Amino acid sequence: MKQQPAGNWLPMATVIFLLCVGCSLSSFAQFSIGLEGGYTRNYLQTNNANRDFTNYTPANGFNIGIPVQYKISNWFAIALDPTYIQKNYVQQRSSFYTGTYQISTNSYAELPIMAHFMFGGKKLQGFFNLGAFGGYWLSGNVKGRMPNVLNPIDSVTATNTVYYYSTPYNYNEKYTFDTRRDNRIEAGWIAGAGVSYAITDRYSVFAEGRMRQSITDMQKNYMINQVPRYNNTYSANLGIMVSFGKNTTDNQ
Amino acid sequence: MNRKTIVYIPVVLLVLFISSCTKSIENVSRPENYYPGTFSDVFEAFWTGMNNNYIFWDIDTTDWDAMYRRYQPVFARLNINDSADVRKSVNYFRLMTQGLVDSHYNLSFGYGAVADSSIDPAYSRKMDTIHRHVFYPQYVVGYMDDGVDGIDNSTDPNEVRYAIAGTINKNILYFYCNIFELKSSYESSTNNDIKKVLDYFFAKLANPEGLKGVIIDVRGNPGGEVTDLNFLLGKMVSSPLTFGYTRYKSGNGRLDYTPWAPAVITPQAGSKGLNIPVIALADAWSVSLAELTTMAIHTMPNGKFIGETTWGANGPISSNQNYNGGQFTASDFLYAYTSSSEFKYLDNNIYEGKGFPPDIAVPFNENYLSQKRDAALEAAITDILQ
């Protein structure tokens, strides 16, 4: 399967970024740690155009993390954000098969490392995050409904859905990993933007929207002409940060 | 560095990042949508159709990737307009599929020089060792003291359906059908004699006083409609009977499966269940629903299976659309008939390609038959009466 390359802009952008950091380094060192959590919405990127009346749709979940920042300058920090995050999706059938679905709930432990850019006033600041993440697929759950071929309905009273012929089977069970198929290691890019408000010199609260794009397939490369599956996850988080250390430069 | 620059740099990086994130994934084509202009197209259609639709990749020992590497260049050298090459291609398809575990599997061709050719890997594997197909009722009637038989060649004029029911030793109820289309015949608007056979059998089941056992004979039966499971066995159970599990494809990956759903016999209205022995007679020619019927009887608390290990085609078949897997057409060149679901018995074993083994093995005995005796039936009678 062809995928678009990540882009040739990356090396140049990295050089520009390092120059910027170098230009603005000063005797500034502040460590912050906090807690954040919020909503996620995940899109499964794959292709099943060969399947009738079968579509993948995004699903909601949540994430909770412990953001850690090390401020190098008044506009830049390095951020780590160990996170528990759900990347869920739904497979849904329509028309004659309406009522057939599967909600896949997938939990990941994730460690993003990001460049954290800040701008604005002393109290209210805007920020951008840009970086990469590595993660591990911790567990999964599948909940859904499907027609049960070996539990047929004895008296067909109508013909407009498959469930007039086969009894529905409803399930809600732990996803069983297959070591031949499932790639539990995930990596990708992450970007976010938000605002923070300093309640005191030490405490600040923030709101942030993030996007994560995995660049690793959810499956191991186990077959020729494999159709890849990538997670594309958006999140909206609220959090609080506690700062330690001293700002020895004027932030403005 | 001024503040504007500091703000713009991450914005630019962010935009570049997001624009690079779009994943481009090629469409997966349906196998029937490949135009059969060359043998390369036909090969891709067939190989991809199998790759995405075959249900048994988790247990099959065929290395499908190796088949691609080996036969893709072979097919690329064939000329689809040369009838000698077209005939050669059938042999290559045979070699690719000869080890497939799906014992329903059949390839039929509808193209030029090979129209009406077919490939049946399970039969090819068995043909040198399996005994002849026997119509057992011709021997069973000698044991019966009462009964009724009948045919139905009107519900489906393309097939002759036959059933017989009766008693043996006046206390064993016996039933045989040559194919599972019982409900279809029973509810058919056409007059047929299967109805009177079923009425006889169901009347005896509803009033089993004096019976010491029931024999369901599915020897030589190739299977049929799944609705017959409830229609026939649902009159012998008083509560739902789970006898195994099925699962389907959940995606295009070879190992993408749904969870297992229970295979259930649902009691029919008025059924009080049977507390006398129920014996399934099956042989090496009992296929598909005949095997599932045997397994379901084996699961009953009073059930037993006597005879030979069955054929080994247990995965139910439906349209590809219904369960996103199974049978497909490859670019108008061939049609692949294959299971749309995988079945495992209650003991968590998958008997596809192996066959379900009997509790009491009675091997095929030509010598007995030449004396108009039925060894498996005699074993069943002995088991019930002992």
Image (cartoon, coloured by chain):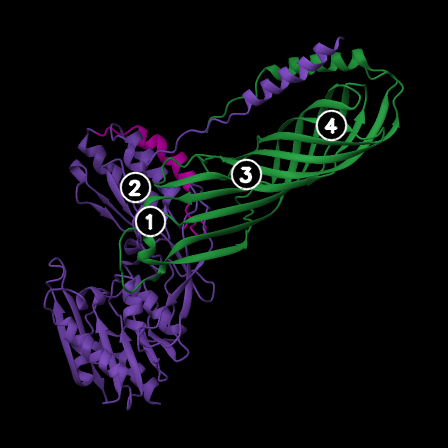
Chain colours: A green, B purple
User: Which of the two discs, 2 and 1, labels the residue nearer the N terminus?
Assistant: 2
Write down the region rendered in magenta: B56-80
**Residue drawn at the location 37% of the way across and 70% of the way down:** B296
Contact? badges 4 and 3 (CB < 8 Å): no
Q: Name the amino acid type tagged 1.
A: Asn
Q: How many labels were placed on the picture?
A: 4
| Residue B69 spot, x, y in % from top left | 41, 34
Q: Which mark is residue A196?
A: 4
Contact? badges 4 and 2 (CB < 8 Å): no
Looking at the rendered structure, the secondary structure element under dot 2 is helix
Residue picked out by circle 3: A218
Residue B294 in sight in this render: yes
Quadrant for the C terminus of chain A, please: top right
Q: Name the amino acid type tagged 4.
A: Ser
Residue picked out by circle 2: B93
Q: Is residue B345 left or right of residue A67?
A: left
